Image (spheres, grey):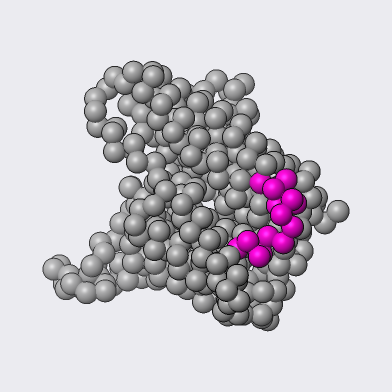
Amino acid sequence: MNIWIAIIGTAVGCYAVKLAGLLVPGHAVERPYVRRLAALLPVALLAALTAQQTFADGHTLMLDARAAGLGAAAVALLLRAPFLLVVAAAVVVTAGLRALGG
Amino acid sequence: MTQHIAFTDQTAEGTEKPDAAVVRDALGVGVAVGLSGFAFGVTSAGSGLGLLQTCALSLLVFTGASQFALVGALAAGGNPFTAAAGAFFLGVRNAFYGLRLSQLLALPRAVRPFAAHWVIDETTAVTLAQPTRRAARIGFTVTGLSLYALWNLTTLLGALGAEAIGDTRAWGLDAAGPAVFLALLAPMLKTATERAVAGLAVLLGLGLLPVLPAGVPVLVAALAAPLALVAESRRGDRADGDTPADPPGPDGRRAPQDTGGTSGAEEGR
């Protein structure tokens, strides 16, 4: 049940902001500070999420095969690999290390 | 799932653009990104969500970063409200895409509630890259339609696949989520401010993880964005107040900017 609450809440909230963008007159929110904040907010959230999902298990910080997987993804990004290849690199390296007992 | 939209380089080719070329560009993005719904389906099912829940997310939320964030937060044991809040804040950028698109597409009011569901990184990037309103409308529609159809189909296949293979961790699939986030994040790290925000957010997100309830550290980490803006404007003021010729260095390197070119849609590329 909790999961459905989260799903419905996210769906309603995300749809509302999409629609608001199309309906609200541009000048109302096009202030430089607001735009800048909107651009920086995803940076902060994505960085925190990347770190947590790589280095955490529940409330514990840990270093495991996922870190190597993320490193592989970073290398793929630097090499300008396509999106799917970036994800695949992380998955393959993580799985490979675990198969080796890492 | 956004940064590889290479054809945005082609926008300078003039005012007219054949419809077929627009459709080809739009399909290229729609198909490439649509296929990555597979990663979401696998991640979501591997996080313990049911088939119906996983598919509902792709059908109803349809903005990838928020979907990944939500299932990650739920898997970590976050309560539904903090989990939804993190996903919601990630989705706020779509409002700023909508502001741009509503001017470009000039949609009738009756159409907007339907078009709104497709206002995401990829459709915005394709639409902004078109030279005319006709091309923009075609680009938006074709990208939205192909991406929505494929994203939902591959979500279903990914969720079914995850159930079939059982332990997704053994297959390294728990690394797919963070890799997706990193791929979305990397093209946004353009200036020192973005990198400072990312670094501070990582410190807050990891440092607070052991002491705060699940899902809350990410919301606290979001404060790195307004903090950086405050620091940036202070630095800008001081640099302005100093000598006319700013010395180079950490302060003088970046002119205070009013972000004309840093609006939402570029983040999504």
Quarter of the image where one finds residue A12: top right
Q: Nearer the viewer, residue B164 or B48?
A: B164
Query: Which is more toward the observer, B128 or A20?
Result: B128
Q: Is residue A16 magenta?
A: no
Q: Is residue B87 in sight in this rendering?
A: no
Rendering coords of residue B142 (x, y %): 50, 26
> Residue at (57%, 52%) from the top-left corner?
B65
Height in image: B189 above or below B56?
below
Is residue B219 or residue A30 the one in the foreground? B219
Q: Residue at x 57, y 74 (%)?
A: A100
The spot of residue A101 in percent (x, y) is 60, 76
Q: Pick out the residue farthest to the right.
A: A1
Image-based side of B42 in relation to A37, left or right: right
Q: Residue furthest front?
A: A100
Q: Kindly indicate the quadrant of the structure image that contains residue B199.
A: bottom left
Q: Residue at x 55, y 30 (%)?
A: B146
Q: Position of residue B235 (x, y in %)?
A: 32, 71
Give coordinates of residue B261: x percent, y percent.
33, 47
Residue B239 in view of the camera: yes
Residue B170 counted in the magenta span: yes
- Magenta residues span B158-172
B133 to A25, vertically: above or below? above
Q: Is residue B14 above or below residue A13?
A: above
